[in-house]
Amino acid sequence: MAVILLGLVLCVMDSTMMNMALPQVARQWQVDPAQTLWVVNANQIASLVLLLPLAALGDRMGYRRVYLGGMVIFGLASVGALLAPSLPWLIVARALQGLGAAGVLSVNASLVRLIYPRAQLGKGMALNSLTVALSFVAGPAVAAAVISLGDWRWLFALHLPLALAISWLGTRSLPQPVPQAAAAQQPLSWLDGVLNIVMFASLFLGVDRLSHLQPGGSLWPAALWLGLGGGVGAWYLRRQRRLSAPMFPLDLLRIPVFALSMCASITAFCAQTMAFLALPFLLIEARGLPTGQAGLLISAWPLALAISAPWVGRMIGRWPAGRLGAVGMALFALGLWALALLPQDASNWNVVWRMALCGMGFAFFQSPNNFTIVTSAPLHRSGAASGMLGAARHVGQGLGAVLLAAAFLVWNREPGQAEQYALLLSGCCAVLAGCFSVLRKAPAKA
């Protein structure tokens, strides 16, 4: 588990740190700031499009091999990012980092399932979820501290030695591959891999275009990308339907509890992303708070999540996961709506308890939901279930960014109005996630 958690910290923090470095990168190479966004996009696209192929590869070759291979690629690509002489070089290196991170993230939940006994798996999933959440939030803060002391390249300085150390520990401690006969008998198709990549990349680019749409801008570029993704996706899914162990796990989506858990995960991450992106604008731009003070207030969210997650982990298995998830999303929605209705002259305490309610609510939801997704899949399809966890997070984050952009386009008459409506809308998404969660029945024993 130490290997798993260290790998999560390294890959998840890296995915969020570069956002803080983009202005410095643009100044150093004297390029348009909009071009630097591809430093982030290349990493996200590579990770998203390869999650399911690598998860399928893990079902066939063993999760340990995919995890360790991804970690080595991630470390070597970090050297390329550290030594990048130009923006295109940095973008390529970041894409390779995304490939390596996909190898790590696509099978990490599968490895947790192999490491923990069934009776303690809830605790393992809670620890996994806690590490992802805290790393996601801590990434920008760590990056800001590093950049304030030196060059952005220092963000990659420790990646290679850490990746090699994690790989060395992994060869000694990660569980050996378990033969998965059902998946191994069905070789991977290179055409399905290409179709998966094109589908997810096109949909990502279409959603990204929508999220950056300016007033009066044309919808055609976004529509073309989304149309391409939809057309390729229809062909891809038609090919997948006749397979017993498909790369895109249609077999798992036919399991009601798995499908409902996936819907709950997507809508919950949509709500979280919308809120997390809107809150700095609300506190700093609309309320005029100093950046440092706003950051401290927002930190109540991950702190409450960190305190609640171990407690929730002990409850998994004793209480129905659907009920825990529904309670969590109810608390999350109340916290988001309370933030939306925050008085103009609210004290710090009034902000903190609202943030803490959001963090506690998300903790009650995330670990039981992840536990349900992983354990509702047959053991030989653990890799596919693990890959879908990462895909749900990416899809939810993309939808959240689009909905926030829509809020800024529609409600922009007064300062803070768009942020307020975005928080109200994110609370509605949380309620929807709670509805998906409460509809589930307990999964069969794995």
Image (cartoon, grey):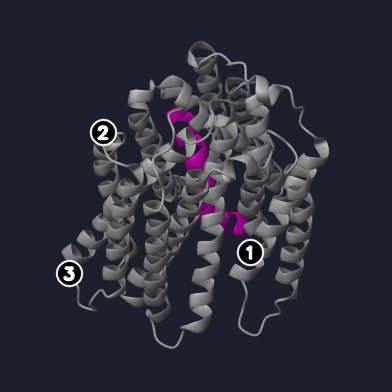
Mark 1 or 3 closer to N-term?
1
Q: Main secondary structure of the magenta part?
A: helix
Q: x%, y% of residue 304?
A: 25, 48
Q: Which residue is mark 1?
A: 207
Residue at point 73% right, 37% down? 243
| Real-space Cα separation, disc 3 to disc 2, in angstroms | 34 Å
Range of the magenta residues?
A: 4-27
**Taking 345 as reference, is 87 left or right?**
right
Residue 218 inside the magenta-drawn segment: no
Q: Residue furthest toward the bottom?
A: 413
- Give the amino acid type for the residue marked by disc 3 in the picture: Ser
- Give the amino acid type for the residue marked by disc 1 in the picture: Val
**Taking 87 as reference, is 235 left or right?**
right
Q: Residue furthest toward the right?
A: 191
Q: Which residue is mark 2?
A: 314
Question: Foreground: 21 or 199?
Answer: 199
Are discs 3 and 2 less than 8 Å apart at CB?
no
Mark 2 or 1 closer to N-term?
1
Numbered disc in front, either 2 or 1: 2
Question: Foreground: 204 or 193?
Answer: 193
- Give the amino acid type for the residue marked by disc 2 in the picture: Arg
Residue at point 58% right, 21% down? 64
Q: Quadrant of the N terminus?
A: top left
**Taking 80 as reference, is 127 left or right?**
left
Q: x%, y% of residue 336?
A: 32, 65
Q: Is residue 35 above or below residue 127?
A: below
* Residues packed near mark 1 inside 10 Å, few (<14), some (14 to 19) or many (20 plus): many
Q: Which residue is mark 3?
A: 347
* Residues packed near mark 2 inside 10 Å, few (<14), some (14 to 19) or many (20 plus): some
Residue 22 inside the magenta-drawn segment: yes
